[in-house]
Amino acid sequence: MMASEDVPLHFQDAKSASMLWPVSYRRSRSNRIKTIGLSVIALFFFFLMLQSSSTRVEPDFWTKFPSRHPFPQRPEDAQVLLPPRTDINVTDTLPHDLDKPNPRLHVLVPGSRGSRGVCRTLTSAMILGYPPPTLIGYGHDSPGATEAERMVDRITRVRNYLRDSKTVHDRDFVLLVDGADTFFQLPPKVLVERFQAIVRENNRKLRDKYGFAEVEGQKPGDAPEMIQKYTQRVLFGASKICYPGLLDDPGCVSVPESSLPPDVYGWKTDVYPDGSLNRPRWLNPGAVIGQAADLRLIYDEVLRLVELRSNKSADYQALTQMYGRQEVIRELERRRTSNDFKELLYRMVGISDAANITGINIRLETGHRYEFGIGVDFESQLFFNQIMSRKDVEWVKFGNITKMSALQMEHGVPREHRLLLPQDIATLPNPFIQSRFAKESTQRPVWNATLDKLPNPRERTWHNISLMTNVHSATVPVLAHLNGDPKLRNTWWENMWFFPWGRALLRKYVRDSHGFDAAQSSLLGGQDWLHVRGGRGGIWTDDENWVTLSEVCNGQERDLFDDDLGPWAKENGDPDEPVYNQYGSLIAGKEEKVD
Ligand SMILES: *[C@@H]1O[C@H](CO)[C@@H](O)[C@H](O)[C@H]1NC(C)=O
Ligand SMILES: *[C@@H]1O[C@H](CO)[C@@H](O)[C@H](O)[C@H]1NC(C)=O
Ligand SMILES: *[C@@H]1O[C@H](CO)[C@@H](O)[C@H](O)[C@H]1NC(C)=O
Ligand SMILES: *[C@@H]1O[C@H](CO)[C@@H](O)[C@H](O)[C@H]1NC(C)=O
Ligand SMILES: *[C@@H]1O[C@H](CO)[C@@H](O)[C@H](O)[C@H]1NC(C)=O
Ligand SMILES: *[C@@H]1O[C@H](CO)[C@@H](O)[C@H](O)[C@H]1NC(C)=O
């Protein structure tokens, strides 16, 4: 006997009234009583079903809900990191028309004031060599506003910045992180490379799963083109818990399963009641990376949805629902084009990769876009979410072989093995090497043996500094989002590898940025090319003002460095320094008089 399950999905047509579109799939049930009569009836129904399925006209979900991505180039093909240039010698002078034609990286941090959390986010980003962050909404605190109003204001500002800023181009990479509680751990090179590697791999899987669609050629008269139906374009952090209160929503039910093994937290994986042994699977909005145009499309929709609700986490809810709806439509389209027999067989053998859309009851509007290229970082290669996960990480030195061999076993990870320092970290330059000219340079901050003391780079390498490591997924995340117990924030900050040398590393970052080495490095295609707006040791605001870190984080030194060396940038009574961009134009402060 065949049992069919109806999926009530309501399709709201723009013109006609809403209608119910029963989408059904079949599931096998073993049939114990075999009588000839029943078989005949079954056969009769079977033919009836064949008949109906051949005449059933199913909508093409890919076009019914516009799914073709408006931007044909893919993020994994963008060249954000330039290969080192070999055609210019180190002794050549800088050409005047220096510009960076390829996409840049922008770091957006919503934050209306320099709270402790915001200052830690900014400080760690700078120490790791990220381009100057842009603080969204800085100085625009409205004391009377409700939390929901603040959220709408924050989302509006993010969207407007992505839409209106002259420095943000469509193809640029944008990293948007929660300002209040994000600690950076690894440099931007690792972030960009891992993002592109994940998206490339996932897009290969999406191509195999969903196939291609035929579209018209670019110009009239051109032959039709085949394009991949669904692609991933942005990456959010993954969480062990779904947005509360949406338990029957596709955002919690229909989204893809984790790529981690089903027993990665032991035999209670995914079933332990408090959720702490769930494999991270659900979207968390605390960190996201993608190209500016793709994020703009997403935040346009988030804004549309949050304006309909008044709840301080309505943005989280909106993103969860958008991810779920994207997956429902992909699944409907997959079922439309897949072979019934293959579906049945895969389901019986248990290797079906079908999304769960059983019992889903949602309203979908014809002509509305639900496809946003959203995916999540299941293995926390980029983003680690602390909630329900505090016990999954440890700060370890990979050079300690005894420790690294036993680590997974200590955490009860099945099929454990020795963890090795990831290759993309092992090949990074040593973070403690001072620029050749640091000591002689008159660039501020002027060299001071006490303030600039760093360990000897021959004794400290990426192999023997403590890196926050997710023991279960065997990854060293690029950043940590501390959305769990707030009481852990101070200890975790002090655990970060840079903490003991925070001030000296930050001074090094500021000094290196306008020194000779940086100019050469950018000329030769180095990391300084990630962003060419200029300025370091400070931040931009979304209304394009430059603010120094000491202005934003004045008084937070104890929480940032805990070293009793006084206020940042005023250690030796230095006056505020002028800030120049890479073309030598003044962007903040007073021009220095040369007598
Ligand atoms: C760079 O310098 C080397 C010698 O130091 C020279 O052979 C080579 O031609 C130079 N390359 C360019 C691009 O000028
Ligand atoms: C916001 O939504 C969540 C989940 O639906 C709910 O638990 C919470 O009570 C709501 N808060 C307000 C202020 O409505
Ligand atoms: C699919 O989701 C429904 C809830 O919407 C749930 O009851 C059911 O167990 C799920 N099926 C599978 C196979 O996970
Ligand atoms: C390596 O780790 C072990 C276990 O944590 C520790 O006892 C030992 O002192 C460490 N060795 C070094 C060289 O740090
Ligand atoms: C770190 O490792 C290097 C060799 O890789 C070693 O010479 C040095 O002593 C180690 N330093 C510490 C502090 O463990
Ligand atoms: C270096 O900085 C320390 C701490 O601020 C200060 O006491 C010392 O005088 C400075 N040394 C020089 C040479 O400026």
Image (cartoon, rainbow, N blue to C red):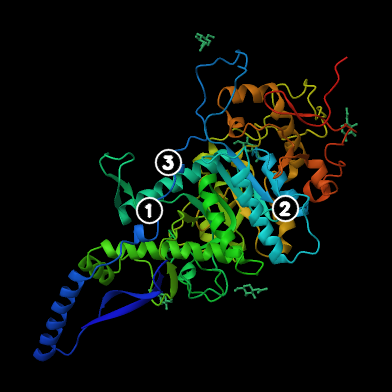
Q: Position of residue 562 (x, y in %)?
A: 81, 48
Q: Are marks 2 and 3 in contact (CB under 8 Å)?
A: no
CA gap between label 2 and label 1 equals 34 Å
Classify residue 169 as left or right of residue 123: left
Which residue is labeled 1 in the image? 230
Give whichever of 83, 38 is nearer the camera: 38
**Disc 3 beta carbon < 8 A from ligand 1?**
no
Classify residue 270 as left or right of residue 124: left
Secondary structure category for the residue under label 3: loop
The label on residue 111 is 2
**Disc 2 beta carbon < 8 A from ligand 2?**
no
Q: Position of residue 276 (x, y in %)?
A: 56, 69
CA gap between label 3 and label 1 equals 13 Å
Q: Earlier in the sequence, mark 3 or mark 1?
A: 3
Secondary structure category for the residue under label 2: loop
Q: Amino acid at mark 2?
A: Gly
Q: Earlier in the sequence, mark 2 or mark 1?
A: 2
Q: Are marks 3 and 1 in contact (CB under 8 Å)?
A: no
Q: Residue at x 68, y 34 (%)?
A: 432
Residue 394 seen in render: yes
Report the quarter where the C terminus lies: top right
**Disc 1 beta carbon < 8 A from ligand 3?**
no
Q: Amino acid at mark 1?
A: Tyr
Q: Earlier in the sequence, mark 2 or mark 3?
A: 3
Which residue is labeled 3 in the image? 73
Q: Position of residue 442 (x, y in %)?
A: 80, 22
Quarter of image, res 504:
top right
Quarter of image, res 455:
top right
Q: Residue at x 35, y 58 (%)?
A: 62
Q: Are marks 2 and 1 in contact (CB under 8 Å)?
A: no
